[in-house]
């Protein structure tokens, strides 16, 4: 009997060839923040997965926090992404772009001239960030966003989603996880506001809801997903009182908006705090759409979650880096190649497109 993991799945108006998702992973190969031929080759090598979700892609010059990450807010970037979507679709794959505004996780050296480091509040991060010009640098304190800047940022997501459709993507994933801008609003560790975008859970999730609502209106509900990481400690965020109620409410509201999926990240396999079953269950219960689970899965663990109806799709991350044909390998039980961590974020093909495809 075929395992559920390798069975087809209908999500909205697209048919996925299997229930395996390639998780979004920053790879820092977009020179000048423009997608290129090398990136098209990388994604097309992995087109055998049910759904590819691209690396975090900024909807705004203000969201380009890391060196060499792609954007999706101008014509050149649309043309670059067309190469990627064409290459994936030629192989029968499906691909969503992840829209990631880094917010306070940034440095001016990684941003174009005139861009600003924006966040819900002027709360800085501890630690350092890589810049190609001056290597590791301290995080600057971000600028607290004005109401006008919040509205502008929402509109940037919507424009980026429209451009994503123009570039040939099957949909967009709003990155509300890992301590980037949307999660900075959700989490009171980073959001100290007292206006309609802060203080209560209802207000802190408003930014995410307004982006989702407007994006759905712009490109259709079947083309919009959301990634979340409750209990995630990435980028200086912490657990807080009322966390599970916050995500219960977020899931309920996203269900009302009608987005296609919620993608729940659990990085406990990599040493992060565990995401409780109770919060995963309440998101599942309150959200009627597809649930993607991510975090340290193998075939057996994936099959258990699918059989128990805890999730509908299972995302794999790092194994995809060094195993372009991961779906085939998981199916046959072939040995996986370990990834070279030293080339995760370096420019060029080494550790990117040079892993054996067969």
Image (cartoon, helix red, strand yellow):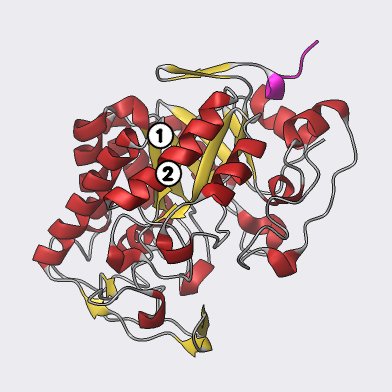
Residue beneath disc 2: 81
Find numbered disc 2 in the image and state the secondary structure of the residue it sits on: helix
Assess whether residue 220 is covered by the magenta stretch: no
Callout in the foreground (2, 1): 2
Q: Using a 10 Å C-alpha cutoff, classify the residue at mark 2 as few (fewer than 14 neighbours), some (14 to 19) or many (20 or more).
A: many
Residue 209 makes an appearance in the image: no
Residue 307, position in %: x, y?
68, 22
- Mark 1 residue crowding within 10 angstroms, few (<14) / some (14–19) / many (20+): many
| Furthest residue toward top | 1
Which residue, given by chain and number where applicable, does mark 1 sit on? 169
Above or below for 27 versus 53: below
Q: Residue at x 62, y 32 (%)?
A: 47
Task: Give the residues in magenta.
Answer: 1-6
Quadrant (top left/top right/bottom left/bottom right) for the C terminus:
top right
Q: Which quadrant holds residue 50?
A: top right
Q: Can residue 341 be seen here?
A: yes
Mark 2 and 1 residues: CB-CB less than 8 Å, in contact? yes
The answer to whether 187 is drawn above or below residue 358 in the figure is below
**Helix, strand or loop status at disc 1:** loop
Quote the CA–CA distance across marks 2 and 1.
Answer: 8 Å
The residue nearer to you, when weighing 257 against 246, is 257
Q: Provide residue 233's location: percent of width, then percent of height.
A: 53, 67
Q: Is residue 37 left or right of residue 258?
A: right
């Amino acid at each position: 009997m075929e395992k559920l993991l390798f069975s087809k799945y209908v999500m909205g108006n697209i048919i996925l060839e299997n229930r395996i998702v390639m998780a979004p992973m920053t790879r820092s190969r977009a020179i000048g923040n423009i997608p290129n031929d090398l990136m098209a080759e990388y994604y097309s090598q992995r087109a055998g997965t049910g759904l590819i979700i691209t690396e975090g892609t900024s909807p705004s010059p203000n969201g380009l926090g890391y060196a060499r990450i792609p954007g999706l807010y101008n014509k050149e970037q649309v043309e670059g992404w067309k190469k990627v979507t064409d290459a994936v679709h030629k192989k029968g794959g499906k691909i969503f772009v992840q829209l990631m505004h880094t917010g306070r996780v940034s440095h001016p050296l990684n941003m174009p001239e005139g861009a600003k480091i924006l966040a819900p509040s002027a709360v800085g991060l501890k630690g350092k960030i890589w810049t190609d010009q001056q290597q590791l640098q301290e995080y600057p304190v971000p600028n607290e966003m004005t109401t006008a800047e919040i509205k502008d940022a929402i509109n940037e997501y919507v424009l980026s989603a429209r451009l994503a459709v123009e570039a040939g993507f099957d949909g967009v994933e709003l990155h509300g996880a890992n301590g980037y801008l949307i999660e900075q609003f959700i989490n009171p560790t980073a959001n100290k506001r007292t206006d309609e975008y802060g203080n209560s859970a209802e207000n802190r999730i408003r930014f995410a809801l307004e982006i989702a609502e407007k994006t759905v209106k712009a490109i259709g509900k079947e083309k919009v997903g959301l990634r979340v990481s409750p209990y995630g400690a990435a980028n200086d965020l912490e657990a807080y009182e009322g966390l599970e109620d916050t995500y219960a409410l977020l899931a309920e509201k996203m269900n009302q908006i009608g987005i296609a999926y919620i993608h729940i990240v659990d990085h406990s396999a990599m040493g992060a705090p565990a995401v409780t079953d109770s919060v995963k269950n309440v998101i599942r219960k309150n959200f009627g759409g597809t649930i993607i689970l991510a975090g340290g899965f193998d075939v057996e663990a994936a099959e258990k979650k699918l059989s128990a109806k805890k999730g509908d799709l299972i995302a794999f991350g790092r194994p995809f880096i060094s195993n372009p044909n991961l779906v085939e390998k998981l199916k046959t039980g072939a040995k996986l190649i370990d990834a070279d961590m030293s080339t995760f974020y370096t420019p060029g093909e080494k550790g990117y497109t040079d892993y054996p495809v067969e």
